[in-house]
Image (cartoon, grey):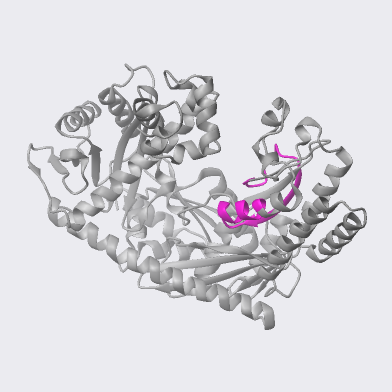
């Protein structure tokens, strides 16, 4: 800790109250580093300054503390709510526990009239009006459910802008995934029936739906409408498959099942969701927490998760360890979400089966993470041996553009826990000559390190030229950074990279060297992040199909291309050879298309 701050901190600790409340750790410039809660403020805050603290994250926090502010409250419940409100407002860097805190995916039925749409999205967007179902632990789970709904009830899933412009039915109508309400091939009344059936299906009312389908099939057969009867029969078969998949879940109702495990420095929390008696899947989290009190660790995680990440909380939270502040947590959740919440550490029968399933998954996830965790730490150790200095944090930059268009610079961050996606940054590059990667990198580095702290190792994707340019940037900013330039080998083949150091030396590590594997992992992630953001920006800027920007590719050949592959996604997945097989394209045009879409 800064020696000039120590007397001041000791004075603060000596006069600190023993009442419950929240505390704020501040840096030298007054920046908020951490927010915490405590039953006894004096005891809790003093514990940060004990000599036997071993956790690197806590050590790093303490080293930056310059001042401490406290706020006394009347109860632990108030402290918990205030703590989470401050975290949500300020996002202090040392409060971030979850590696991936994206909102959960929901399926929603819009309120558009007379033809609502069904779609999925993250969180319950305030701009979206309609009924929401979920949450689903991943986009894959939501898409899988949407596909079943689309096959069963043929309700549209297209965007409103696409829907309004249609003059004839699209491919979804041809493959019997939509009834083409856009061109009036179904009446609003019939369409609303399909929408209502979709809502009942998403609510879990599959038995009544099955009886209705049987009645419609028999009626169609009596009226000799055999094609319609076959249609209803196929719907029934698909519905039976769905019912069979959900047969093991015997209870109705909603619950989150939460299991925690800790092993060899790695903490894992598995959350599984039951909605309308159906298991919707689960997700593993690896929060930055260490300790031997699993109940307290789970309490801290749940506070972070339900107040910062989740859009809703079910009435039951089933946990594999009891929480030391269970009643306070229930009270805080009730106050936050406006309904009674029960946290249940002891359950029986079906709920016990759910909990056993969550515990199996958390053990499986922690074993997998531990294997990769040990491998990652070995890679860091080998890198430290190569560079001759400790490396706890790596940042890497990459540039992506298409022929100079929509240039994006990416910055990715890795530490001993893996990719720190919350710390990733992207920079839209402006006011440079199109295609000038040196100028783009210069602008990105300047914007990044005017404010941010330097990492232990800064990787520059490029050879001596890019490295020298980065050195000039650091000199201009008055910073001393440890940097390595990574140039690709002959034929851009992985394993042949050369590492360039700022003192002019260069080395080429063996292809199987773990330090090289770490450098490749970080560099490839920077490239992936840059190109993903660049493509999104490029396509948004163009405002139309990406194919329209390819020189020499006219309307007819664009239409032939899309027809051949069934849409733009098929084109994006096609190889250069597959593109050349489209009638009228040829190898030269196929190469041009592939280059624009992928390079």
**Is 79 in front, or is 95?**
95
Q: Is residue 222 left or right of residue 33?
A: right
**Residue found 80% across the figure and 51% down from its top:** 227
Residue range in magenta is 121-147
Residue 53 visible at all: no
Residue 589 visible at all: yes
Is 140 covered by the magenta stretch? yes
Q: Residue 127 at what x, y percent from top left?
A: 70, 36
**Is 486 in front, or is 593?**
593
Q: Residue 43 at what x, y percent from top left?
A: 46, 66
Please identify the quadrant where the C terminus is shown: top left
**Residue found 28% across the figure and 41% down from its top:** 454
**192 relative to 72, above or below:** above
**164 relative to 49, above or below:** above
**Is 130 in front, or is 63?**
130
Is 254 covered by the magenta stretch? no
Q: Residue 77 at what x, y percent from top left?
A: 64, 62
């Amino acid at each position: 800790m800064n020696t000039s701050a120590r007397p001041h901190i000791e004075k603060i600790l000596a006069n600190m109250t023993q009442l419950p409340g929240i505390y704020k750790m501040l840096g030298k410039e007054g920046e908020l580093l951490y927010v915490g809660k405590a039953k006894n403020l004096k005891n809790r805050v003093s514990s940060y300054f004990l000599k036997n603290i071993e956790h690197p994250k806590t050590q790093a926090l303490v080293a930056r503390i310059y001042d401490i502010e406290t706020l006394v409250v009347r109860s632990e419940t108030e402290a918990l709510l205030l703590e989470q409100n401050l975290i949500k407002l300020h996002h202090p860097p040392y409060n971030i526990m979850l590696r991936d805190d994206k909102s959960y995916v929901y399926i929603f039925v819009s309120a558009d009239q007379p033809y609502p749409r069904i779609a999925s999205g993250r969180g319950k967007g305030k701009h979206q009006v309609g009924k929401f179902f979920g949450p689903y632990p991943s986009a894959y789970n939501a898409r899988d459910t949407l596909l079943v709904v689309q096959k069963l009830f043929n309700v549209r899933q297209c965007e409103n802008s696409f829907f309004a412009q249609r003059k004839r039915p699209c491919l979804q109508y041809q493959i019997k995934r939509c009834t083409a309400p856009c061109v009036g091939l179904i009446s609003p009344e019939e369409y609303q029936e399909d929408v209502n059936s979709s809502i009942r299906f998403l609510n879990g009312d599959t038995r009544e739906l099955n009886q209705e389908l049987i009645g419609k099939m028999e009626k169609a057969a009596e009226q000799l409408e055999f094609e319609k009867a076959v249609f209803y029969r196929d719907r029934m078969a698909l519905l039976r498959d769905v019912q069979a998949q959900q047969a093991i879940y015997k209870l109705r109702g909603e619950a989150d099942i939460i299991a925690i495990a800790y092993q060899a420095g790695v903490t894992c929390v598995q959350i599984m969701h039951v909605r309308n008696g159906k298991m919707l899947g689960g997700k593993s989290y690896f929060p930055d927490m260490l300790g031997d009190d699993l109940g307290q660790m789970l309490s801290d995680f749940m506070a972070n998760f339900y107040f910062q990440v989740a859009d809703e909380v079910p009435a039951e939270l089933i946990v594999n360890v009891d929480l030391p502040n269970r009643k306070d947590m229930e009270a805080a959740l009730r106050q936050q979400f406006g309904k009674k919440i029960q946290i249940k550490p002891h359950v029986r029968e079906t709920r016990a089966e759910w909990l056993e399933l969550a515990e199996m998954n958390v053990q499986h996830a922690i074993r997998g993470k531990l294997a990769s965790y040990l491998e990652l730490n070995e890679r860091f150790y080998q890198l430290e041996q190569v560079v001759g200095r400790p490396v706890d944090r790596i940042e890497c930059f990459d540039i992506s553009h298409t022929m100079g268009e929509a240039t994006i610079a990416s910055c990715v961050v890795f530490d001993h826990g893996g990719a720190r996606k919350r710390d990733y940054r992207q920079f839209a590059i402006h006011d440079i000559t199109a295609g000038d990667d040196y100028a783009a990198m210069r602008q990105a580095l300047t914007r990044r390190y005017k404010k941010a702290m330097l990492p232990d190792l800064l990787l520059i994707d490029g050879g001596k030229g890019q490295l020298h340019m980065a050195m000039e940037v650091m000199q201009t900013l008055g910073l001393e950074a440890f940097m390595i330039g990574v140039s690709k080998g002959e034929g851009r083949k992985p394993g042949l990279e050369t590492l360039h150091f700022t003192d002019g030396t260069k080395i080429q590590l063996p292809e199987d060297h773990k330090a090289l594997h770490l450098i490749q992992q970080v560099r490839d992630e920077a490239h992936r992040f840059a190109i993903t953001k660049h493509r999104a920006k490029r396509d948004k800027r163009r405002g139309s199909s990406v194919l329209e920007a390819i020189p020499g590719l006219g309307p007819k050949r664009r239409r032939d291309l899309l027809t051949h592959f069934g849409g733009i996604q098929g084109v994006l997945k096609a190889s250069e050879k597959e593109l050349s097989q489209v009638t009228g394209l040829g190898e030269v045009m196929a190469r041009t298309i592939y280059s624009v879409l992928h390079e």
